[in-house]
Image: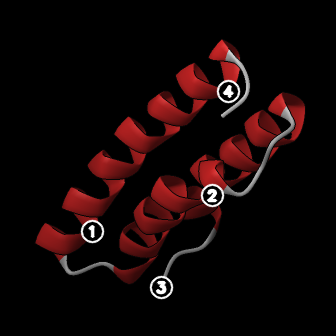
Amino acid sequence: MESTSQLVWGMLFGAIGMGFFVYGKRQKAIVPLVTGIALFIFPYFISDVYVLVLVGTALLALPWFVRI
């Protein structure tokens, strides 16, 4: 992590991902579970803050559009 904003955005998406993960595990719903895992992992691989926020918001919107 190069900057403070990356760290803050990564922590925010990770905390929201924890919520998705716990919800998906308890409800046995695959989309929130996988979204939560993706929200944990993706900040480690993206170094640009704008791309980080864009991908994070896309992942946050995913469970509302994909219903399995």
Q: Which residue is drawn at 57% across and 26% down?
A: 7
Local secondary structure at mark 2: helix
Three-letter residue code for mark 4:
Gln
The mark that comes first in sequence, 1 or 4, is: 4
Which residue corresponds to mark 3? 68
Circles 3 and 4: CB distance less than 8 Å? no
Which residue corresponds to mark 2? 42
CA separation in Å, label 2 and label 3 = 22 Å
Q: In this view, does 1 lie above or below 18?
A: above
Classify the position of the N terminus by image quarter. Answer: top right
> What's the mark number on residue 24?
1
Q: How many labels does the image show?
A: 4
Three-letter residue code for mark 2:
Phe
Q: Which of marks 1 and 3 is in front?
A: 1
**Mark 4, residues whose alpha carbon is within 10 Å: few (<14), some, or many (≥20)?**
many
Residue 34 in the image, given as x and y percentages of width and height: 45, 74
CA separation in Å, label 4 and label 2 = 12 Å
